[in-house]
Amino acid sequence: MTRPLAAQFLPHNQLQRLLDTLHHSGHKVYGPQLRDDAITYAPLATTDQLPLGIEDHHAPGSYRLQQNGTQHWFDWLSTPQGIKPLLFKPRETLWHATRDATGAIHFTDPASSAEKIAVIGLRACDLAALKLQDQHFLSVEHTPDPFYTERRRHLFIVAINCTRAAATCFCTSTGDGPKCDVNNSAADIAMTELDSGFIIMAGSAQGTHIIEQLALNDADEAQLNEATQREANAIQQQRSVPSQNMRDTLFAALDHPQWDDVASRCLSCGNCTAVCPSCFCYSEQAEPQLDGSSTEQTREWDSCFTQGHSYMHGITVRHDTKLRYRQWLTHKFAGWHDQYGRSGCTGCGRCISWCPAGIDIIDELTLLSTDKGVADDA
Amino acid sequence: MMHNPHRPHRARIVERIQESGTVFTLRLEFIERDIREHYSFAPGQFNMVYLYGVGEVAISIVSDPKRPQQLDHAIRAVGRVTNGISQLQAGDTIGLRGPYGRGWPMEKAKGRDVLVITGGLGCAPVVSVINYITQRRDQFGKLTILQGVKLPKDLIWRDRFEQWINELNTEVFLAADKGDPTWPWHVGLVIELFDQMTLSDDTIVMMCGPEGMMRVCIHELLLRNIKEEAIHLSMERNMQCALGQCGHCQYGADFICRDGPVFSYDRIKPLFAHQGF
């Protein structure tokens, strides 16, 4: 048993040493970087690549970055994508098949491409969503996905505690944030950014091992107080889910007139499912070579908002937007409780920011749970 | 790499039987001996059948579980993959993985009367039940088969139905929406046959077909004091991974490929009355 490390202090000018230590321990490091007016995760070599003094402002259908004049690297809150694309790839090959001259077919697995990855910057809502994806893709009781499992095993997480809240954040109400529970999350390391550096804590033996190599001093009381104050800024959020368990409410509201209302605004584009860190749907396709000698089976993220999602031999079960939106919302906030013992939403607010029609899931949930619906399609 | 459950195994087409204009049966055998010898299944379970370079389809196994080394799949040529598969011949190689899902409650049905209801073209999954019972006749009570079709030509396996009519302790009721001179049975809707049947309170029902038909049949069954938990339905949705992963076949909290395809009515009742799930 290793003794748990006390919270330590990592000066700003030492962050590069953390990145180097992760590199030296064999990790490819991913971190937040400015690209196309958004902050996204990309391979990170030096701290110069981090978004210095930039904060993000969110509203329904809106995401804007702004300079805030600070020397902070982590004043932004939510990237368009969380960690999902690094573990559950947007597109990947499941297996290959070849056919020889005699017509005999052979199936083979793709070569393993898992590498050790360290990601710096994830938030409490991202970690909670990672747990949900783990439940879905790692379940031994069902069938673990070999691709997800291999990447997940090689993942090292440096989480960042939020010190602001966006207008779209509601992780406090879902119980998933804003502070990372370092002892009970996927984080190997969790940090809170101060004006002069970071409070750094280990969440795993691996995290302890990395921090020990940095030979840092314990954080002093003033630093811990500053962290507590800054973390408190993130707790006060403007949005909240009506309840952490909306299962019965939503299943009782299947004929609610609000579904028609939201369907009149929803474009069925699937942006919400693409940015949602817990959505797991994918479709498979065969991709044969032109000469027919080989083919591969690939999977690609799918969305319950597409027409093909519910298609079977001539019938589209969810033929209109109303049924698709209802499928999405009732799965995420109702069916998920039966599947995985909690709601499928961790309060990141991405579906609100990235909805081109500005649909606010909190408004929809509130209307669905407060107004009494009138049966209109029974 | 750890076990890859997505990857099919090679299987040989042992025999191809044309059942009707569009329906054919493929008898398949895994080529790898190890896979073949460790394979077992229950009636109502399905396999994913893969056509090289085209894709996979979920097809229920209609042959008897006591012969798991040769697996019969009744397939209707309706789409890209099934039309392609229909072109294959005995000796050709395809991909196969399974079995998947939960099948019919055959243990629960032992000693009880069994009512099998099928409609439209979807009778393959329940044919496995009928075959299972007729092969083990003394383990079950009365077998009643109710099948509805639109047109007489839609009835596949007509010879088998005619055979089942003569089975011991078995009643067969057939209905076609429109009759013709070749159709000696009822002309009209399936539900019109309910009054001709006598159902004991202990009847267990196994049903497969269009959801609209299943809805009206459930209504009739409940009127006749059949309990909700004694009614079993084979459900169908878009299936791609068959592992409860890809999300297409979700029905409320259930993944039909994994938690079904056979459900008791009481389990899916809350959503069954609603379109769009």
Image (cartoon, coloured by chain):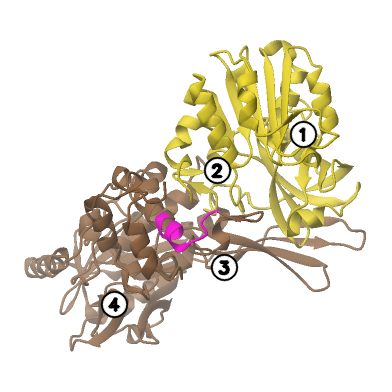
Chain colours: A brown, B yellow
Read off the chain for label 4. Answer: A
Pointer 3 local density, CA inside 10 Å: few below 14, some 14–19, many at least 20? some
> For the residue carrying disc 4, how many other residues have a C-alpha within 10 Å: few (<14), some (14-19), or many (20+)?
some
Q: How many marks?
A: 4
Question: What amino acid type is highlighted by mark number 3?
Answer: Arg
Residue displayed at 26% across by 61% down: A362
Chain assignment, label 3: A
Residue B43 at least partly seen: yes
Task: From this view, report whether residue A260 is shown above or below residue A23.
Answer: above
Q: Which residue is mark 4?
A: A15
Chain holding disc 2: B
| Quarter location, residue B20 | top right
- Which of these two is toward me, B171 or B229? B171
The circle on residue B37 is 1
Residues at circles 4 and 2 in contact by the CB criterion of under 8 Å = no
Callout 4 and callout 2 share a chain: no
- The segment highlighted magenta reads A317-326
Q: Residue A199: which quarter of the image? A: bottom left
Q: Which mark is residue B256?
A: 2
- Density class for disc 1 (Cα within 10 Å; few <14, some 14-19, many ≥20) is few
Q: Secondary structure at mark 1?
A: helix
Q: Nearer the viewer, mark 1 or mark 3?
A: 3
Which amino acid, by three-letter code, is at mark 2? Ile
Question: In this rendering, do the residues under marks 1 and 2 share a single chain?
Answer: yes
Residue pointed to by mark 3: A91
> Residue A93: x and y, percent?
63, 64
Name the spot of residue B47 as percent of width and height, x first.
69, 43
Q: Considering the numbered disc 2 on the image, is that residue within a helix, a strand or a loop?
A: helix
Question: Is residue A280 left or right of A260 when viewed as pictured?
Answer: right
Left or right, residue A56 beside residue A140: left
Distance in Å between CA atoms under marks 1 and 4? 58 Å
